[in-house]
């Protein structure tokens, strides 16, 4: 269930601040026309290092592409040499899509390589007029904040903290847009924890404001695909089939409530759609600890 951003202010519609149907994986090449400042190649005293790489082949949402021109990429490695972050085309596209829906005073969970705020800026792709960024890593702050300060001409406050602690603090602050992007993977197993974070963030959204969660629709789709597979199995064989899947992929545990709900039922093409609607509502509502 896993896979390794100018717009006018829009009304939020019946879903309120958060729209689970907003899909930030929608294909766009608009981001290609917006040059961004990237952190410089460096070796930090902690051992973290930023390297530059020109990419000729990339994967975007699971599909391999050969690029017509080399793509300038920064790769952030931890002291053990493990790749932590990179500004791949997929990352740019998702940041652009979120940024294009952003406006006003924006709360950001996770500084990363600082792509999103540059796209979200009023007159670029979004309508942001200022940022409060919560970033848990002082090293990421040291590497990326100066780059952002040099290019953003709007108020920018960066705090070193965990977004969960910040949101649990009941500061009374309100934001026109909240964009959270602190999880590493697009994995449906993240959804219960992300839903919990979403509910912590909700009181911080101004009336008419917007709450954006990186990769949310994609992860819900992965869950729906997994449910479709489960429900296609003969009802008598489902428990053993699910057990075997859980042994391979711990996140398959998320399917337990689905198996229980549709226990003993064979679903035809029509009822599978209704069942999948239930699965979708379930995964959007379920909250982790
Ligand atoms: C993938 S990056 C975000 C990319 C960013 N949206 C951009 O535009 O480049 C995730 C960031 O979240 C930070 N982070 C991870 N967990 C966090 C937490 N609980 N609270 C605050 N920041 C967190 C990481 O240190 C990292 O800088």
Image: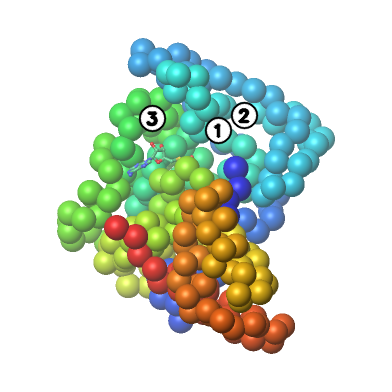
Residues marked 1 and 2 touching at CB (< 8 Å): yes
Examine the rendering and report whether any part of residue 18 can be seen.
yes
Residue 100 vs residue 95, the one in the foreground: 95
Give the mark nearest the N terminus, 3 or 1.
Answer: 1
Question: In the image, 108: left or right of 267?
Answer: left
Q: If the image is split into quadrants, where does the C terminus sit?
A: bottom left
User: Splitting the image into 4 quarters, where does residue 105 fall?
Assistant: bottom left
Instruction: Say which residue label 2 marks.
Output: 73
Give how far apart the Cα atoms at labels 1 and 2 are. Answer: 7 Å
Instruction: Say which residue label 1 marks.
Output: 86
Q: Quadrant of ligand 1?
A: top left
Q: If the image is split into quadrants, where does the N terminus sit?
A: bottom right
Mark sitting on residue 140: 3
Does 188 appear above or below 203? above
Rendering coords of residue 74 (x, y %)? 57, 27
Residue 257 vs residue 194, the one in the foreground: 257
Indicate the secondary structure of the residue bearing disc 3: helix
Examine the rendering and report whether any part of residue 154 can be seen.
no
Indicate the secondary structure of the residue bearing disc 2: strand
Rendering coords of residue 14 (x, y %)? 46, 81
């Amino acid at each position: 269930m896993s896979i390794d951003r100018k717009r006018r202010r829009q009304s939020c519609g019946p879903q309120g601040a958060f729209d689970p149907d907003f899909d930030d994986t929608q294909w766009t090449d608009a981001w290609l026309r917006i040059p961004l400042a990237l952190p410089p190649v460096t070796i930090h005293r902690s051992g973290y290092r930023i390297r530059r790489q020109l990419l000729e082949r990339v994967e975007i949402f699971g599909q391999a592409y050969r690029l017509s021109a080399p793509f300038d990429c920064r790769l952030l490695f931890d002291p053990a040499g493990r790749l932590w972050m990179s500004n791949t085309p997929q990352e740019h596209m998702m940041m652009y899509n979120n940024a294009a829906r952003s406006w006003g005073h924006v709360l950001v969970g996770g500084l990363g390589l600082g792509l999103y705020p540059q796209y979200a800026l009023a007159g670029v792709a979004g309508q942001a007029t200022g940022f409060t960024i919560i970033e848990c890593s002082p090293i990421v702050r040291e590497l990326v904040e100066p780059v952002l300060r040099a290019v953003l001409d709007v108020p920018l406050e960066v705090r070193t903290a965990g977004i969960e602690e910040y949101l649990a603090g009941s500061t009374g602050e309100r934001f026109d847009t909240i964009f959270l992007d602190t999880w590493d993977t697009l994995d449906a197993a993240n959804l219960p924890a992300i839903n919990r974070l979403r509910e912590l963030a909700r009181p911080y959204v101004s009336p008419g404001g917007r709450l954006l969660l990186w990769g949310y629709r994609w992860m819900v789709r992965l869950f729906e695909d997994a449910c479709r597979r489960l429900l296609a199995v003969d009802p008598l064989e489902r428990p053993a089939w699910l057990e075997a899947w859980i042994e391979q992929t711990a996140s398959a545990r998320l399917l337990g409530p689905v198996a229980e709900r549709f226990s003993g039922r064979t679903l035809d093409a029509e009822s599978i759609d209704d069942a999948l609607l239930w699965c979708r509502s379930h995964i959007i509502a379920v909250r982790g600890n």
